[in-house]
Image (cartoon, rainbow, N blue to C red):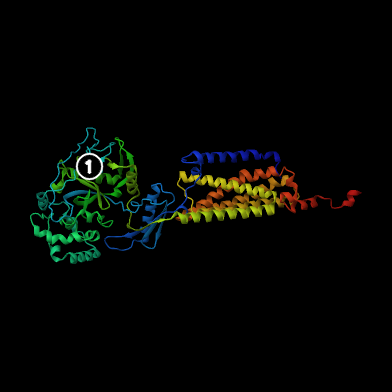
């Protein structure tokens, strides 16, 4: 038996729907909105609709050249995707291609993707020796400049180093804890005598060069040996310290072939040879392939500022020892990267700063000491030295990488360190901008398809359901307005971007909405055929059709959720758009369709078969209500 009509108050549900519209479009026009009226109504559009940047990264390995495993490539893809999303990029598509490529697609032209594929392998290495990195054979290394100053530990235990004036990034202890401090050392280049004396200085990590060399690297070294010639190779192998070309001009001619080597060829040379041969300069060293000095158990050579090259000790503290990294403003209102070490990492960091502060075993050569005679620790990111500050005390707390950072620079570096080092190294192979003209044609085609689909549904609805077709028409319009407003708001708040696949998902949702109409209206006809009046049939039909409508939409929504979880790229956009449209369709069903049907049931037009669209259901009910024996009635 149908519930009394008095229990249904359609005005309240329509008021709730109106409130939702008001709140949604207030957010559209005033929440994070900028520009003109038209600009505030524009959703974020994807690369396939407005054009954008597509970059192909190829996985490389400077040691053995083997392709990465599928697990490492997938892990790299996830890290790159996290980095891109952390930059606030709207719906980046990061997918693997083949067995060694990762393709990144971003909406908007000329997007800077320089850093998203870098390995971001952070190493803390003690500086053992320093030399000129100009690579000029005929000119001896220049004399060291006068130091510009340093910092000493503050009485409170916090470290506040004095800037050197160079603006180069440096590492300091956080103000919240730790003892001692780290001051940036000047970009000193050793004098010839300082370089020559390096051979007399014992190295605490001399055994590092005794590590086994992979067979493929040995083959590449033999190829380099043949290229430079036996005489040059023998002369370079005999060097125990950076060669003084001013004292032995004939040595310059012998070592000259090393200046013609490519960065990839330089990368396979032993670290001692890279450091001791003066014709190998920072121009070659800075352009070595990624991961050329990634082995923490090996000594390494790296440059700072493009002019000075340093022989670095084994990496005693790694990026994995850093538990968190954030871009923050320090007490001077400058952007810095705050480093928090994990339990084991903090112990390693304290041990490294103690070793450098006391110069254990006199491992640091005079050419590598800071202005106060203390060892320096190089902060090495990938192949480059970010800074090489002098250790002014033993640091027992967390640290900061400081320098002339902008907010973007600090956030980029913190993101790379926070999400971890890539298990695979990459080189950018291709970069292209997708023209917006093609995207505009896709957008027109997608909107045309959506418009045709909605028009066909509306034409069918008015042809078959007459007055009830107006309910379908208004419901689709309201659903479209809700979806559009949600797209604009979600684009600003969470960076959701509408792609061609998303438009396809919304077109599919039209079929789901049409199904719910058919279920409700056909159930209504069945109730009238069973003898109920149209007014009493509306709530009865709603109660019986509601469960089916919810079940059908729940299945669609569940499918969209599963597809979103397991898919990547534009398929995620399709799943999200389909799920969003399905949820909003349910809102319209409960807050508009059922209340408006209750209101229509109280009108005279609803009782007319030709106008209401109930068709033969009303005549059938009239026949059922007529007496079976007219003669008996007359008698």
* Residue 142 showing in the rendered view: yes
Give percent across and percent down for residue 119. Answer: 31, 53
Give percent across and percent down for residue 472. Answer: 64, 49
Residue 360 to residue 245: above or below: above
- Residue furthest top as drawn: 155
- Residue furthest right as drawn: 635
Give percent across and percent down for residue 185. Answer: 19, 43
**553 left or right, relative to 600:** left
Image quarter in which the N terminus is found: top right
Write down the residue under mark 1.
Answer: 166
Element under disc 1: loop
**174 left or right, relative to 210:** right
Local packing at callout 1 (Cα closer than 10 Å; few below 14, some 14-19, many 20+) is few
Q: In which quarter of the image is residue 453?
A: bottom right
Q: Which of 517 and 405 is in front in this view?
A: 405
Give percent across and percent down for residue 532. Answer: 75, 48
* Residue 533 showing in the rendered view: no
- Residue furthest left as drawn: 247
Exactly how many numbered labels are in the figure? 1
Q: Which of 561 and 41 is in front in this view?
A: 41
Q: Which of 49 and 466 is in front in this view?
A: 49
**87 left or right, relative to 519:** left
**246 left or right, relative to 53:** left
């Amino acid at each position: 038996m149908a519930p009394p009509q008095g229990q249904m108050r359609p005005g309240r549900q329509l008021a709730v729907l109106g409130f939702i519209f008001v709140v949604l479009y207030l957010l559209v026009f005033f929440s994070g909105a900028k520009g003109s009226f038209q600009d505030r109504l524009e959703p974020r559009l994807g690369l396939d609709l407005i054009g954008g940047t597509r970059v192909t990264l190829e996985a490389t390995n400077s040691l053995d050249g083997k392709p990465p495993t599928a697990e490492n490539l997938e892990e790299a893809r996830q890290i790159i995707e996290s980095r891109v999303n952390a930059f606030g990029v709207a719906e980046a598509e990061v997918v693997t291609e083949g067995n060694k490529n990762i393709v990144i697609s971003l909406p908007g032209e000329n997007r800077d993707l320089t850093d998203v594929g870098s390995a971001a392998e952070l190493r803390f290495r003690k500086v053992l020796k320093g030399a000129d990195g100009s690579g000029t054979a005929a000119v001896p290394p220049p004399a060291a400049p006068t130091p510009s100053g340093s910092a000493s530990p503050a009485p409170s235990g916090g470290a506040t180093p004095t800037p050197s004036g160079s603006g180069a990034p440096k590492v300091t202890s956080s103000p919240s804890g730790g003892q001692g401090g780290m001051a940036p050392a000047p970009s000193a280049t050793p004098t010839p005598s300082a370089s020559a004396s390096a051979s007399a200085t014992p190295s605490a990590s001399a055994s590092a060069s005794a590590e086994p060399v992979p067979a493929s690297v040995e083959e590449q070294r033999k190829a380099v040996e043949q290229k430079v010639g036996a005489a040059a190779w023998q002369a370079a192998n005999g060097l125990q310290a950076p060669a003084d070309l001013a004292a032995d001009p004939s040595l310059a001619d012998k070592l000259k072939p090393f200046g013609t080597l490519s960065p990839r060829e330089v990368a396979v040379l032993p670290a001692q040879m890279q450091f001791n041969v003066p014709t190998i300069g920072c121009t070659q060293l800075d352009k070595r392939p990624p991961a050329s000095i990634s082995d923490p158990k090996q000594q390494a050579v790296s440059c700072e500022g493009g002019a000075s090259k340093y022989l670095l000790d084994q990496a005693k503290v790694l990026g994995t020892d850093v538990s968190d990294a954030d871009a923050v403003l320090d007490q001077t209102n400058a952007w810095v990267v705050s480093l928090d070490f994990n339990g084991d990492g903090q112990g390693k960091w304290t041990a490294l700063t103690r070793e450098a502060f006391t110069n254990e075993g006199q491992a640091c050569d005079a050419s590598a000491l800071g202005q106060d005679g203390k060892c320096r620790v190089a902060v090495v990111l990938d192949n480059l030295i970010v800074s090489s500050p002098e250790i002014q005390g033993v640091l027992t707390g967390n640290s900061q990488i400081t320098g002339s950072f902008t907010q973007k620079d600090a956030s980029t570096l913190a993101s790379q360190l926070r999400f971890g080092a890539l298990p695979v190294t990459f080189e950018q192979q291709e970069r292209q901008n997708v023209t917006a003209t093609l995207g505009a044609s896709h957008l027109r085609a997608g909107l045309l398809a959506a418009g045709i689909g909605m028009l066909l549904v509306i034409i069918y609805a008015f042809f078959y359901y007459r007055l009830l077709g107006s309910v379908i028409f208004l419901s689709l319009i309201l659903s479209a307005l809700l979806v559009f407003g949600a797209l604009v708001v979600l684009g600003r708040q969470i960076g959701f971007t509408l792609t061609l696949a998303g438009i396809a998902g919304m077109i599919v949702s039209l079929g789901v909405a049409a199904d719910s109409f058919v279920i409700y209206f056909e159930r209504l006809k069945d109730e009238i055929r069973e003898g109920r009046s149209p007014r009493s049939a509306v709530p009865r039909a709603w109660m019986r059709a509601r469960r089916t409508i919810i079940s059908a939409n729940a299945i669609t929504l569940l499918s969209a959720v599963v597809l979103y979880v397991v898919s990547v790229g534009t398929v995620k956009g399709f799943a999200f758009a389909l799920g969003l449209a399905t949820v909003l369709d349910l809102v319209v069903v409960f807050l508009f369709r059922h209340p408006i049907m209750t209101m229509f049931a109280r009108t005279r037009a609803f009782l007319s078969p030709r106008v209401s669209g109930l068709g033969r259901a009303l005549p059938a009910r009239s026949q059922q209500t007529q007496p079976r024996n007219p003669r008996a009635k007359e008698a």
